[in-house]
Image (tube, grey):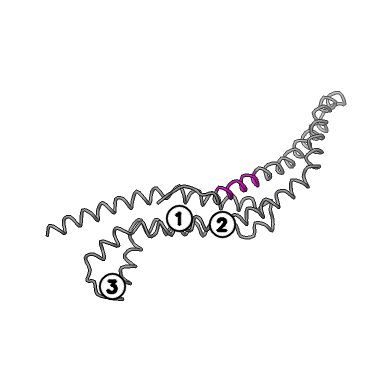
Amino acid sequence: MTNNTTPKIDSFRAIVVKAATLHAELTTLATAISTRDAIKTRMGDSRDEAEARKFLGELARAEESVTVKQVREPRLKADLADTVVQAERTFHDAFTEVENMLSALAVYSVLDFRDLLQSIQPEEDNRKRDEANKVTLAAVVPAVFTQRLRDDLDNAWRAMSGVAKDPYQGVYGVRTALAIMDEIIASQPQVHAVTRRMAAACEAFRKVFAKG
C-alpha cells in the first residue's frame, strides 16, 4: 500500500497552481484601480493646488500600473480560461488515481478482520451470512474512515462542476478539488494506523481462540 501522490495527480496540481497564479495576477488590476482612485480622492480633498500637486507623481505611477495591467488583462484572461480547461481535463485522471487508491485501501483496511470473520464461520455457502459479513465489515473503523474519504472525493467532483463556464470564479473550484484530494492522500496514514491496530487485535484473538 502507498500513500504517495502520482504523476497524474502532480500534473493536476501543477495546472491548478498555474491557474491560481494567473488569477492572482488578474486580481491585481482591481487593486491597482482602487489605489489610483484613492489617490484621486486624496487630491480632490486637498486644501489647495500646492497640496494637490504633491500627489501627481504618485498618481502618475498608479495610472501607469493600471494601464500596463489593463493591456495585459485580455491575454491573462485567455491564459486563465485555457488553464482552467486543462485543469478540468487533468482532474478526471487525478480523480481516478485517488479513487483507485481508496478502492485498494478499502480492501486492505478490512482484510485481517474479514479473514478472521471467515475463519470462525462454517465453510458452506450461506448467502445471508455473506451479506451480514459485508454489513459488519463496512462498520469496522478502518472501513468507516475509508468511506468518509470516498465521500470527500465526491465533494471534489462537485467542486469541479462547471468551472470552465466562468474561469475567473472557476479557479476556486479547481483549488478546492485539489485541496480535497491532497487531504485525502494525507489522511491515508491514519487509516493505515487503525488498520494495523485492528490487525494486531485480530492476531491476539486468534491466539486466544487457538488455546481454547
**Distance from label 2 to label 3 (Cα)?**
37 Å
Which amino acid, mark 2?
Asp
Residue shown at 74%/42% (left/top)?
30
* Mark 2 surroundings within 10 Å by alpha-carbon count, few (fewer than 14), some (14 through 19), many (20 or more): some
Which amino acid, mark 3?
Arg
* Residue matched to label 1: 101
* Residue matched to label 2: 93
For marks 2 and 1, the one nearer the N-term is 2
Q: Residue 10, image x and y in percent?
A: 55, 47
The secondary structure type at the circle numbered 1 is helix
* Mark 1 surroundings within 10 Å by alpha-carbon count, few (fewer than 14), some (14 through 19), many (20 or more): some
* Mark 3 surroundings within 10 Å by alpha-carbon count, few (fewer than 14), some (14 through 19), many (20 or more): few
**Distance from label 2 to label 1 (Cα)?**
13 Å
Q: Residue 70, image x and y in percent?
A: 80, 42
Which amino acid, mark 1?
Met
The secondary structure type at the circle numbered 2 is helix
Residues marked 2 and 3 touching at CB (< 8 Å) = no
Residue 198: image quadrant is bottom left
Name the quarter where the C terminus is drawn: bottom left
Residue shown at 56%/53% (left/top)?
177
In the displayed structure image, the side of residue 100 where residue 200 appears, left or right: left
Residue shown at 34%/67% (left/top)?
135
* Residue matched to label 3: 129
- Dominant secondary structure (helix, strand or loop) of the stretch shown in magenta: helix
Range covered by the magenta-colored residues: 10-20
Give the vertical position of 65 relative to 8 (above or below).
above
**Distance from label 1 to label 3 (Cα)?**
28 Å
In the displayed structure image, the side of residue 168 where residue 42 appears, left or right: right
Residue 27: image quadrant is top right
